[in-house]
Image (tube, grey):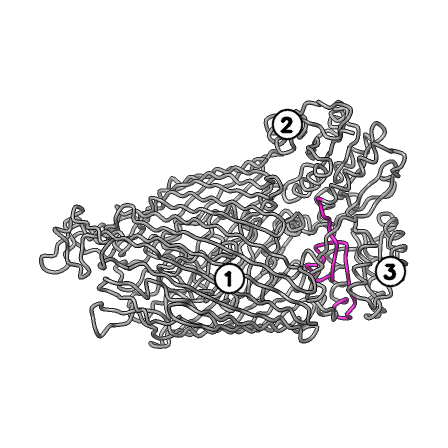
Amino acid sequence: MQLTEPAVPASRRALLRQALGGALVLAGGAAPAADAGRGLAVVYPDLGDPFRQVFTSIIEGIEDKLGGTVTSIAVANEASLTQVADDIRKRGVQVLIGLGRGGMRIAASLATEMAVLVGCVVSVQEAEARTFPVHTLAPDPALLLARLKRLRPAARRVHLVYDPKLNGWLARLAREAARAESLELQAQEAADPAEALRAYTQLLAAADPARDALWLPQDPTTVDDNAVLPLVLREGWNRNVAVFSSHLAHVKRGALFSLYPDNRELGRTLAAAAQRLLSAPKAVAPGVLPLRQARAAINIRTAAHLGIDVAAVQSGFDLVYPSN
Amino acid sequence: MPGRSAGLVGLAVALSLGAASAAAQTDEDELALAYGDQRSVSIAAGSRQSLRQAPAVASVITAEAIAAMGAVDLDEVLQTVAGLHVGRSANQYMPLYIFRGIYSQFNPQVLLLQNGVPMTTMFVGNKGNLWAGYPVEDIARIEVIRGPGSALYGADAYAGVINIVTKSAQDARGTAVGLRGGSFDTRDGWVLHGGKLGPLDLSAYLRVGATDGARSLIEHDAAQPAVTHAPGPLTLSHDAVDANLELALERWRAHVGYKLRSDVGSAAGVASALDPVGRGRSERTHADLSWTEPELGNGWGAGMQASVLRYVDLATTNYVLLPAGTTLGPGNVFTDGLIGGPNKWERQMRVSAFATYSGFSGHSLRVGIGHDDLNLYKTTEYKNFNPNYSRIGTGSFGDVTDFSDTLLKFMLPQRRRVDYLYAQDEWRLHPDWNLTAGVRRDHYSDFGDTTNPRLALVWSAAYDVTVKLMHGRAFRAPSFNEQYSINNPVVGGNPAIKPETIGTTEAAFAWTPADTLQMQLTLFRYQMRDIIRSAPNPNAPPAGLIQNRGGQDGRGAEFELVWDASRSLRLSGNLALQRSVDTTTETDAGYAPHRRAYLQADWVVARGTSISGQLNHVASRARPAGDARAPVKDYTTLDMSARTRLGASDWELSLMLRNLFGADAREPSLAGGGIVNDLPVAPRAAYVQAVYRY
């Protein structure tokens, strides 16, 4: 099946967009829908660098997998949702990949008319993924726990404090992953930051450094950068408890390790999912999916403090903090 | 200092996360949750990470930080680093990167690298006197190490090391076209592209620029009062072309670079006498190829690099060293002045390889080997005077004579070969204690061997406190001019001189009391020995002979701070104090500031719009022994810049204002050089810039 639109390469679209000069930024707006009814389109929010680079890499991955350029539509913040949706309809797009929250809104509005899937979003409520698959940026618990086990073979229990509205699905996956790694998952629900802070304080006070580890998910409710994060990292350090995170920036601050997206690979996966959606729509279930196309970052200062042989493990990571 | 790297937009995003609820998530908030702040996003999007080689007092300045401060030249970026002051040489106004009070006329005590390859030219052992600026558009990041680095980097990693890393395909990504213009008829245009070329990652950069340069006034110069051009303006005009190409495939990376400076004015004159006529040209062409495999298996990693450099420094219009009518002794009147044009051609080849091994528990080993072939293969000279300064003919332009094929020129071709070997072990003594020990031995075909060790002990004292104790020895190799200068009645080269050495001890305390506040205090002391300088020659002429003579002892402190005062405001700054004493005269070593303070505020006004202000205070510059002038005047300059993305378009406009209040900023001229009132720098200036990205 031909999924690519032999129209205008993504890089040239920006020029066209500039020539059109509209606040409604339709990168593919001027591209002739030459392959109408058979194409794949990617819609994503028009952000400044370096976030723009993230989408560019994902689109490169998609094009890599499909072997040609795809229609990519950058949507400005102030653009009319209806107008963008109309434009996509007119192009006869068969399968739409929405990237980011902006892309998800458009994909959701077209989900009844065409095959859609979403990627590159965080903190998705399960209700938002009832009709189409959502590939989130939340690292797969199975990958995180396998990494933990390699770094801390003696770990037996992992603590997780999460907002059930945002991360209920993740906690379910985490339970299965923990079983596979012979770990016990102690998952506590917290509906607000204060409740989360209480939970962290208690669990850190009682934690056994040899056996316990703490996982910080991508969860704005339970992982507050100003209150929770300094407390957890400081107490984790003082008590020799391994703290790992689903948030790359936490590694720079002192978390032991994290996983972060491999954008190009993510693009390739989204392209493969789009192909499956077209060829066998029934076989693709809606729902929230974790990130499996991940790279890894480690804080060697923290690793050494925890007694991990840094020299032996460092080479398995793509990013190493601190840099000097 | 780690905090410098985070850009402002990302900073604002990262800081907003704590307060953001899931419902209020913007796309940037969402992405920042997974990728971190702007710097992390850039890294995650594929930028290269700093090569972590050894503990040091280091600063990393990223492209984002450079853009935020509105800098257009390398000097403006380096000026922000604690303990590093950018001064000027009278000759072509070459920038002097003065680390911690280590001042000299040609600044060979600093190793400047581009993508890890030395930019050093052999004639005076520095980056080349005909420098005339280095643009920043193609810089991905600048790594600055204060203190010694000879145990890893060899010669000239003495007072400090500066490594310029140019943009990879990932860093450049897409195409950017820029135009800039402003004061002194300065105009620049450039294009930068990052993308794919078949299976290769490609990054390409081309910049063309020109300036008439500030025409600040020199009140008195070295010329005789009857014939001088002073008071008269500096000649800082030049044309510039810069081009870089990077190709990468898996573990392989290749660079080709070109830097041309033509029609370069002599600033305050090659001999500190104003010369509106003379023009120079420098052309630097270089290429390197490297292969790095950090994981060969079983704990091994390896890499290798080969590079070539061709550097040509020409007087395209011969310099008028002293003006028309100059009289040097009875009857020795130069009708058109003392005219000279020395020209040099250099070719350098370097090969190196390293291996790393982490198979011993708690140890990271690194060993390396290399060979340099440094060849100043051609010199020519045109002049209208003899080595004893007697005129040829009437000392006119017409009397300028080609000395190129004679033994009477300034230097004969010279060549140096260097072989070296180094080893380093990073040993985890204890979970919170890390000891790095390294040593490098260099064998020079001219002056022999030198061995330089380094020790660094790093203690993770607490979750938010790191303490480093470091000691290292370093050397700078004598330049060819210092070894082989001939036919100069003022100073002669000395082939027997040894390297200049330094031993430096440092203690650094880094404290992060809050996520929004980072501080670092560094204390240092050093002992320079066998300083290469001119000393009276009992067998004159020449009057002076280059010798290893005397020492300099220095000590000081640097305090650095980064504070994210709010989600849209970052304040950063540093205070550097130093005192250095010449061990022979036991007086101040002179010219370098005892005190320098720098403050920068970066404010994100709205998405896509930011303003930055930089305050630079340079104070307390004593004169050395033998220079009776009053201390160099203190100065404080304020620079401002603003940039904005035009709506949702791909255009970005910037305005840069330099020395907004027109402070009279001056850098010291050398004693007895004839320029009495020092060198005026940093004139008030304004530039506008437009960049289009697609």
Q: In the image, is residue A254 part of the stretch drawn in magenta?
A: yes
> To which residue does mark 2 refer?
A22
Q: In the image, is residue A154 part of the stretch drawn in magenta?
A: no
Q: Residue at x 33, y 76 (%)?
A: B585
Give the Cα separation between the discs numbered 3 and 1: 49 Å
N-terminal of the pair, mark 3 or mark 2, is 2
A125 lies left or right of B319: right
Give the Cα separation between the discs numbered 3 and 2: 53 Å
Find numbered disc 3 in the image and state the secondary structure of the residue it sits on.
loop
Amino acid type at mark 2 = Gly
B456 versus A2 height, above or below = below
Identify the mark at residue A242; answer none if there is no mark: none
B150 versus B396 height, above or below = below
Task: Look at the numbered discs 1 and 2 and tell me whether their residues touch, using CB distance below 8 Å.
Answer: no
Image quadrant for the C terminus of chain A?
bottom right
Given the image, what chain letter belongs to the residue carrying mark 3? A
Q: Position of residue B644 (x, y in %)?
A: 57, 40
Find numbered disc 2 in the image and state the secondary structure of the residue it sits on.
loop
Q: Position of residue B472 (x, y in %)?
A: 51, 72
> To which residue does mark 3 refer?
A181
Foreground tag (3 vs 1): 3
Identify the mark at residue B82; answer none if there is no mark: 1
Residue B293 sits in quarter: bottom right
Foreground tag (3 vs 2): 3
Q: Which residues are magenta?
A: A235-264
Amino acid type at mark 3 = Glu
Give the Cα separation between the discs numbered 1 and 2: 46 Å
Q: Position of residue B561 (x, y in %)?
A: 58, 61
> 10 Å neighbourhood of mark 2: few (<14), some, or many (≥20)?
few
Given the image, what chain letter belongs to the residue carrying mark 2? A
A178 lies left or right of B107: right
